[in-house]
Image (cartoon, grey):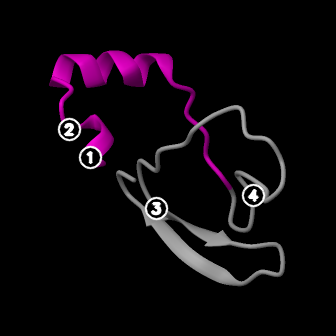
Amino acid sequence: MVRHDIFRDLTPQQLAACLQLWERRKLKRGQRLFEQGRRANSVAVVLSGGLLVEVDDDTLIGRVGDGE
C-alpha cells in the first residue's frame, strides 16, 4: 500500500478511509500526470508501477515508484 513517510502516522483504518476518498487513475505509457509550468490542483501517490520525472526538454531528473 502507500509507504511514503507522509502517511507513516496514519492507522490502517485512517489510510483505508483516505483511499476511499481518493480518485484512482491509470496512466498509459508516455501519458503526463503533471506538466512543468502548469498549476497543479492535486497530489498523486503511485500505488503500483512507476513514473519518470522529466523537465520540458525530456531530461530525466528522477523516478517515482510504488508508495511514493
The circle drawn on residue 32 is: 4
Q: Quadrant of the N terminus?
A: top left
Label 1 near label 2: C-beta < 8 Å?
A: yes
Q: Residue at x 40, y 53 (%)?
A: 68
Task: Specify few, some or many for label 1: CA neighbours under 10 Å numbering under 14, 14-19, or 20 or more.
Answer: few
Instruction: Name the residue tied to disc 2.
Output: 8
Q: Can you say whether 8 is above or below 20 in the image?
A: below
- From the viewer's perspective, is the residue at label 4 or at label 1 nearer? 1
**Disc on the earlier residue, 1 or 3:** 1
Image check: 12 left or right of 30? left
Rounded to the nearest whole Å, what is the CA distance between mark 1 and mark 3? 18 Å
Label 1 near label 4: C-beta < 8 Å?
A: no
The amino acid type, in three-letter code, at marker 3 is Gly
- The one of 22 and 8 positioned closer to us in this rendering: 8
Q: Can you say whether 1 is above or below 9 in the image?
A: below
Rounded to the nearest whole Å, what is the CA distance between mark 4 and mark 3? 14 Å
Task: Specify few, some or many for label 2: CA neighbours under 10 Å numbering under 14, 14-19, or 20 or more.
Answer: few
**Residue 12 shown in magenta:** yes
**Disc on the earlier residue, 4 or 3:** 4
Instruction: Name the residue tied to disc 3.
Output: 49
Q: Can you say whether 16 is above or below 4 in the image?
A: above
Image check: 34 left or right of 45? right
Residue 37: percent from left, percent from top: 83, 55
Label 3 near label 1: C-beta < 8 Å?
A: no
Instruction: Name the residue tied to disc 1.
Output: 5
Rounded to the nearest whole Å, what is the CA distance between mark 4 and mark 1? 25 Å
The circle drawn on residue 33 is: none
SS at mark 3 in the image: loop
**Residue 25 shown in magenta:** yes
Q: Which residues are magenta?
A: 4-27
SS at mark 4 in the image: loop
Rounded to the nearest whole Å, what is the CA distance between mark 2 and mark 4? 28 Å
